[in-house]
Image (cartoon, grey):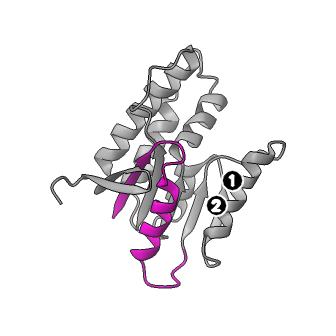
Amino acid sequence: MRTLVLGGIRSGKSRWAEEAIATSLPPGEPVRYLAPTPAHGADADWSDRIARHRDRRPAHWSTIETDDVAGQLRQSPGAPTLVDDLGGWLTGALDRDDAWTGGSVAAPVDAMLAAVGGFGSTLVLVSPEVGLTVVPATASGRRFADELGSLNQRVAELCDRVVLVVAGQAVQIKPSGT
């Protein structure tokens, strides 16, 4: 089962995703937590947020901070995995490929989609939903919103379930009517 969890900043999407994967598995089964954004050591607030996320995860979960989420998914396609989040991963891809002002992230996006589509175990992906706000005022903000909106749509097509988390409450988008 592949699940995409969308939501705004501080919507509760990460907590909901953690509970969803934990309750879908037998008690004590290991979960790989892929964190695409490395800790920003110079930013105390960011470091505190990361620490709070780590503290609420069960001890039998492993955390892997990596830029190569697609490679990690291909490497262990049978290990239940939570990816949090695709917005951080996309930011890194835009940085690495110098794509903020015209480069392309098509190759890493296609590799990510292939890895998600070929994953053979429980997979929960968390991503910001950028479609519920104003159009960003900067070119880089618009580029990010456009790329993330496209990525979210393509990932949603590959997933069995899509939920939107608002104020800690999940609304199921796919499959509809259930």
Is residue 172 among what the camera can see? yes
Is residue 102 among what the camera can see? no
Residue farthest to the right?
42
Q: Residue 26: percent from the left, percent from the top? A: 43, 84
Which quarter of the image is occupied by the N terminus?
Answer: bottom left
> In the image, 164: left or right of 83?
left
Residue placed most toward the observer, 107 or 41: 41
Q: Quadrant of residue 101?
A: top right
Residue holding disc 1: 49
Q: Is residue 31 above or below residue 70?
A: below
> In the image, 29: left or right of 63?
left
Q: Is residue 6 magenta?
A: yes
Magenta segment boundaries in residue numbering: 1-30
Check disc 1 and report its element: helix, strand or loop. Answer: helix
Residue farthest to the left?
177
Q: Is residue 82 above or below residue 87?
A: below
Q: Is residue 147 above or below residue 83?
A: above
- CA gap, disc 1 to disc 2? 6 Å
Q: Residue 158: percent from the left, percent from the top? A: 31, 49
At horizontal 33% and vertical 46% (from top left) the residue drawn is: 156
Residue holding disc 2: 53
Looking at the rendered structure, the kind of residue marked 1 is Arg
Q: Is residue 8 magenta?
A: yes
Q: Residue 75: percent from the left, percent from the top? A: 54, 61
Check disc 2 and report its element: helix, strand or loop. Answer: helix
Residue farthest to the bottom?
27
Q: Is residue 107 above or below residue 64?
A: above
At horizontal 53% and vertical 40% (from top left) the residue drawn is: 87
Looking at the rendered structure, the kind of residue marked 2 is His
Residue placed most toward the observer, 65 or 149: 149
Q: Are marks 1 and 2 in contact (CB under 8 Å)?
A: yes
